[in-house]
Image (cartoon, rainbow, N blue to C red):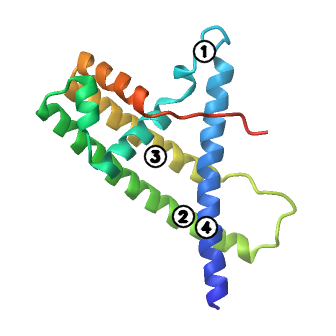
Amino acid sequence: MKTKQLFIVVLTIVLAVAAVIVTRQIHATSNLQSQSPQAQTKEDAIPDHIFYGETLSLLAKLKDVNDYQDRAQLTDEQANFLRVTAEECAEKLAKQDAIAEKRIVALRRQNLKAKPAQSTPPIPAEIAELQAQRNAVILRCRDSLRAGLGHEKFEQFRLAAKSKVHIQMSRVR
């Protein structure tokens, strides 16, 4: 019985990670295809929801904004606003992830009762919608930072973050 429960938990985690990866890849692929090769730069290849999601996640986990503060020339108040925004974003994402995890577990239970499929089933629309909601949370946090810091300081923060956070994406084959 414990083996079955462990199997379900591991499978749920695998499905959740796969759903996030596939959704990110689909979004990244559509973005890459919509841009002309001449206009596309390495900086532009990473969608904002991925870049700011990773940047704010690191800030929330490390709770250290000093380097960003120095590089972006932020005041103590602006750096504190950055830290608080990152932590609030992490909390909102954790809530969104918990909702998705519960739904994935429920879908997994349904699939375990059904006959095994010959191929990998498509990602349910409900899961894709939850991923879209997660992406929207990140973009709202980015917009909150832009509004709170002002255009100039936000741009300085963005450049500082780009110098610190390096994300590479490649096409899945």
Q: Label 1 near label 3: C-beta < 8 Å?
A: no
The label nearer to you, 3 versus 1, is: 1
Q: Earlier in the sequence, mark 3 or mark 1?
A: 1
- Viewer-nearest residue: 69 or 137: 69
Q: Label 2 near label 1: C-beta < 8 Å?
A: no
- Badge 3 is on which residue? 134
The label nearer to you, 1 versus 2, is: 1
Q: Amino acid at mark 2?
A: Arg
Q: Earlier in the sequence, mark 1 or mark 4?
A: 4
Q: What label does residue 12 carry, if any?
A: 4
Q: Earlier in the sequence, mark 2 or mark 3?
A: 2
- Badge 1 is on which residue? 40
Q: Earlier in the sequence, mark 1 or mark 2?
A: 1
Q: Amino acid at mark 3?
A: Arg
Q: Label 4 near label 2: C-beta < 8 Å?
A: no
Within 10 angstroms of label 4, few (less than 14), some, or many (20 or more) residues? many
For numbered disc 2, what is the local secondary structure? helix
Residue 7 vertical placement versus 44 (above, below): below
Q: Amino acid at mark 1?
A: Gln
For numbered disc 3, what is the local secondary structure? helix
